[in-house]
């Protein structure tokens, strides 16, 4: 292949996602043969000392302490937004207006309403864009999509997903500020719905199609917490737990649950789909395996297969080691960068685009509306 084209990345936010994305940009060119090569041009964080340290550690050429500088810089091609949810819209819209490509962390924004101008901005500017719903790119999940598209499950009856954690059980945990912005509705938009169920919903929409109607319940178990930014004890406005039922357009029924109060669970994302011919099941704690049951098997041999998704003819795996050796969580981000760059070279969009991610926002809004009104709600885009 001819010399690779550099794609200069400006990363905003150097927390958890700042690290997973930086790792992805650094590794992608070694494992995927792509026309574009990401260059770690600049990282932005509000603390000069931390931004400098992060830049040194990950090999960024420079750092900034105001994201507007990243957006203005002529030597940045793509802005990658890894900040809390309340800043996604402002940064994305400014970046698109400046003609930058935009890669934005999920959820796109705090609400559907806040997401709409982001879609308008990237589409008006005609800039490539994507949202980091990375679980689509875990090879076993991508293979689930293939099996469904090949018609192996037949008509789908049920879709079930959970995302369970336990880190906010202590009533002494404050809300707001660094590391705890997820408990502050002003920064996060919502609790587990926008944070965890957004992942489950994105995967579900991708695997099983649109959702028509939802009915939900939410609970905030700890009603007041000290706010780190004001120092005062304040009302907690996020949903600590959420469960919802839904009807998909294809006639199947959905059941979703997420909580940060499931003692013993750290990040248990599981999904199961039951069709007339076969079922599949996936579990983030065993992310390289896809559980598959097919009724086509001879009766006496029928049973759940635990497929170790590590072979060269399984999604993404030919780019990695040798058959039988598994990869991990961080690879889902590397795959998203690889797909973004491949689509960029081909002049194609990289799913989910901002527009595609709107549907997840619409479902989240309907879920929260339903919990509040205690009524079924239609998903309105
Ligand atoms: N795709 C996934 O699986 C996944 C996982 C975790 C988080 N996320 C999403 O990624 C985003 C970031 O989450 P995180 O876990 O990395 O959070 P984090 O708290 O670890 O990091 C957030 C970073 O943003 C920085 N920041 C905040 N405001 C800023 C500003 N105005 N300018 C520059 N930097 C600013 C903070 O200093 C921090 O470095 C959120 O939208 C979250 O929902 C996605």
Image (cartoon, grey):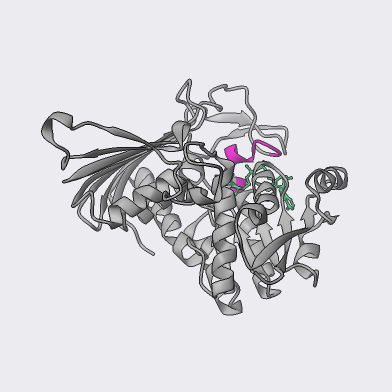
Instruction: Give the residue drawn at x 57%, y 30%.
Output: 224
The percent position of residue 218, horizontal first and vertical second, equals 40, 37
- In front of the other: 54 or 124: 54
Instruction: Give the left or right position of residue 205, taking residue 345 as reference.
Output: left
The percent position of residue 225, horizontal first and vertical second, equals 61, 29
Instruction: Give the residue drawn at x 17%, y 39%.
Output: 297
Instruction: Give the residue drawn at x 45%, y 32%.
Output: 286
Q: In this view of the protein, can residue 260 be seen by the observer? A: yes
The percent position of residue 79, horizontal first and vertical second, equals 69, 62
Instruction: Give the left or right position of residue 337, taking residue 162 as reference.
Output: right
Range of the magenta residues? 177-187
Instruction: Give the residue drawn at x 51%, y 72%.
Output: 348
Instruction: Give the left or right position of residue 209, taking residue 364 as reference.
Output: left
Asked if residue 109 is positioned above or below residue 191 in the image, the reply reads: below
Quarter that holds the C terminus: bottom left
- In front of the other: 93 or 222: 93
Q: Residue furthest left?
A: 299
Residue 184 sits inside the magenta stretch: yes
The percent position of residue 373, horizontal first and vertical second, equals 34, 47
Instruction: Give the left or right position of residue 350, taking residue 81 as reference.
Output: left
């Amino acid at each position: 292949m001819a010399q690779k084209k550099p794609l200069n990345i400006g990363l905003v936010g150097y927390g958890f996602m700042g690290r997973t994305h930086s790792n992805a940009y650094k590794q992608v060119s070694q494992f995927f043969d792509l026309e574009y090569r990401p260059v770690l041009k600049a990282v932005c964080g509000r603390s000069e000392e931390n931004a400098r340290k992060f830049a040194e550690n990950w090999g960024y050429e420079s750092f900034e302490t105001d994201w507007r500088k990243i957006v203005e810089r002529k030597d940045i091609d793509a802005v990658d937004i890894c900040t809390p949810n309340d800043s996604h819209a402002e940064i994305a819209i400014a970046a698109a207006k400046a003609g930058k490509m935009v890669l934005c962390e999920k959820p796109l924004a705090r609400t559907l309403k806040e997401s709409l101008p982001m879609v308008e901005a990237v589409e008006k500017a005609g800039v490539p864009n994507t949202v980091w719903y990375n679980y689509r790119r875990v090879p076993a999940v991508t293979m689930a999509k293939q099996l469904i598209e090949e018609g192996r499950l037949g008509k789908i009856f049920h879709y079930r997903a959970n995302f369970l954690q336990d880190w906010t059980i202590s009533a002494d945990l404050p809300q707001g500020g660094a590391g705890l912005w997820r408990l502050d509705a002003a920064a996060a938009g919502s609790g587990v719905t926008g944070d965890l169920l957004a992942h489950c919903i994105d995967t579900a929409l991708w695997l099983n199609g649109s959702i028509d109607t939802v009915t939900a319940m939410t609970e905030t178990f700890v009603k007041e917490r000290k706010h780190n930014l004001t120092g005062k004890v304040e009302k907690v406005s996020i949903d600590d737990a959420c469960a919802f039922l839904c009807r998909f357009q294809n006639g199947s029924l959905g059941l979703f649950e997420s909580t940060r109060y499931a003692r013993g669970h750290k990040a248990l994302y599981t999904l199961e789909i039951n069709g007339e011919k076969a079922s599949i099941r996936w579990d983030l704690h065993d992310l390289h395996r896809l559980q598959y049951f097919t009724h086509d098997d001879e009766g006496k041999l029928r049973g759940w297969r635990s497929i170790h998704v590590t072979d060269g003819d399984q999604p993404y795996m030919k780019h990695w080691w040798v058959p039988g050796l598994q990869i991990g969580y961080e690879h889902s981000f590397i795959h998203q960068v690889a797909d973004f760059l491949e689509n960029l070279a081909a002049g194609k969009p990289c799913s989910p685009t901002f527009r595609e991610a709107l549907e997840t926002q619409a479902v989240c809004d309907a879920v929260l509306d339903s919990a509040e009104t205690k009524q079924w709600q239609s998903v309105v885009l």
